[in-house]
C-alpha cells in the first residue's frame, strides 16, 4: 500500500525511513528536506519530495500527517481544498497524541477514512526496529481499515474512544514516561558529575530499576520503591538538603522533585500520612 508522509520532523523522518525500507513510501511533503544530503537517499529510490501540500499531484492510498500539532488543521484545510472528492476511500492518519480523529472530520465528509494514530514511542534516533512491537493508540470510525496499516509497521494497535480530557491525561502519561524520565535521568547525571564520577556508574542501577518495574507493569499500583523517602529516613534527607548549600542551582530542583514524588508515594500508600507531613515540612523549608 503506497504511502505519503506530510512533515519531516523526528517522527516523519523515522516513519519515512521505515516505509522506505518496506518499499511503500512514494511521497514526502517537506519544506526543507529537498535541500539536504539526506534527500538523495529517497530520490535514488524514486520517492518524490514535494515542498508544499498544494503541490501534490495525487494522493496515495495512505497519508500520514506528522506535522506539529498546531499545523494539522492547516494541512487538513489544504488537502480538502486541493483534492475534495478525490479523498474518497483514501486513508488519512494524523499522529498527534493530543487530538482525536475529529480534527480530520472535514476530510471524512469527502469519504476519506480518517484516524488519529499515535505511536507510543520516542523518535530521537531512527533504527530499523524502532516501530517493532510498539503500541499505536488509535481513535477512528474505520478501525478495520486502519489496523492493517499499522500492523504492517510491526505495531500493536489499541482502539480507544477518548473524550478530550481523557485524551489529555493519556498524552500526559506518555510525556511523563518519556520526556520527564529523560530529564530525571539528566538531573541524576548532572548531580553525579559534581562528584567527579562518570555518569556511566549509574547505568546498572537505572537498568535494574527499569527491570524491576517491567515484570509488574500491568499493575498501575505496583512500584518497587526503595530509599530514604519510603523509609521516612529524615536524617538522610536532611543530609541531602544540607549538601546542596554548595550547589544551590540543584537544591531547589531536588526539593521540589522529592516533594512531588512524596505526594505520589502517599497517594499510592507507599508512605503514611504522618510520614508525608514530616517530609513535606523538611522539604518546604528548603525551598
Image: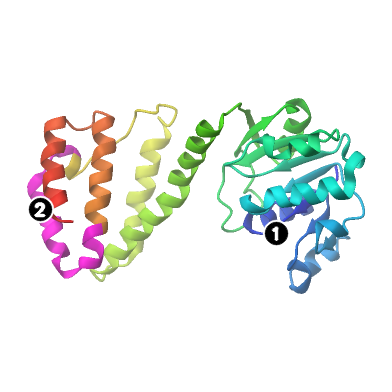
Q: Residue at x 23, y 31 (%)?
A: 270
Residue 235, x across and y down, in percent: 7, 49
Determine which residue is flagged by label 2: 238
Residue 157 visible to an observer of this rendering: yes
Determine which residue is flagged by label 1: 8
Q: Quadrant of residue 40?
A: bottom right
Q: What stretch is highlighted in magenta?
A: 230-252
Q: Say whether residue 182 is left or right of residue 123.
A: left
Closer to the camera in the image, 47 or 49: 49
Q: Residue at x 75, y 53 (%)?
A: 6
Q: What element carries label 2?
A: helix
Q: Does the magenta stretch include residue 127?
A: no
Closer to the camera in the image, 70 or 97: 70
Q: What element carries label 1?
A: loop
Closer to the camera in the image, 201 or 17: 17
Q: How is the image coloured?
A: rainbow
Q: Quadrant of residue 224?
A: top left
On residue 16, which mark appears?
Answer: none
Amino acid at each position: 500500500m503506497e504511502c505519503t508522509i506530510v512533515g519531516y520532523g523526528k517522527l516523519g523522518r523515522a516513519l519515512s525511513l521505515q516505509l522506505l525500507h518496506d518499499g511503500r513510501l512514494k511521497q514526502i511533503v517537506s519544506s526543507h528536506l529537498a535541500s539536504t544530503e539526506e534527500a538523495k537517499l529517497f530520490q535514488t529510490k524514486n520517492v518524490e519530495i514535494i515542498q508544499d501540500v498544494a503541490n501534490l499531484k495525487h494522493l496515495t492510498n495512505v497519508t500520514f500527517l506528522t506535522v506539529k500539532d498546531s499545523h494539522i488543521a492547516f494541512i487538513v484545510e489544504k488537502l480538502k481544498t486541493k483534492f475534495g472528492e478525490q479523498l474518497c476511500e483514501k486513508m488519512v492518519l494524523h499522529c498527534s497524541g493530543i487530538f482525536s480523529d475529529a480534527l480530520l472530520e472535514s476530510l471524512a465528509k469527502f469519504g476519506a477514512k480518517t484516524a488519529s494514530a499515535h505511536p507510543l514511542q520516542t523518535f530521537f534516533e531512527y533504527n530499523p526496529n524502532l516501530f517493532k512491537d510498539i503500541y499505536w493508540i488509535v481513535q477512528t470510525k474505520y478501525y478495520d481499515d486502519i489496523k492493517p496499516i499499522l500492523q504492517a509497521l510491526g505495531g500493536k494497535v489499541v482502539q480507544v474512544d477518548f473524550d478530550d480530557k481523557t485524551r489529555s491525561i493519556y498524552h500526559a502519561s506518555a510525556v511523563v514516561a518519556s520526556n520527564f524520565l529523560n530529564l530525571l535521568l539528566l538531573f541524576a547525571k548532572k548531580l553525579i558529575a559534581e562528584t567527579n564520577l562518570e555518569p556511566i556508574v549509574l547505568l546498572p542501577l537505572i537498568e535494574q530499576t527499569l527491570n524491576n518495574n517491567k515484570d509488574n507493569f500491568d499493575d498501575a499500583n505496583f512500584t518497587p520503591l526503595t530509599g530514604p523517602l519510603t523509609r521516612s529516613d529524615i536524617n538522610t534527607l536532611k543530609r541531602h538538603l544540607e549538601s546542596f548549600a554548595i550547589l544551590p542551582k540543584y537544591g531547589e530542583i531536588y526539593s521540589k522533585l522529592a516533594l512531588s514524588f512524596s505526594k505520589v508515594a502517599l497517594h499510592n500508600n507507599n508512605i503514611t500520612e504522618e510520614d508525608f507531613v514530616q517530609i513535606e515540612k523538611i522539604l518546604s523549608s528548603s525551598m
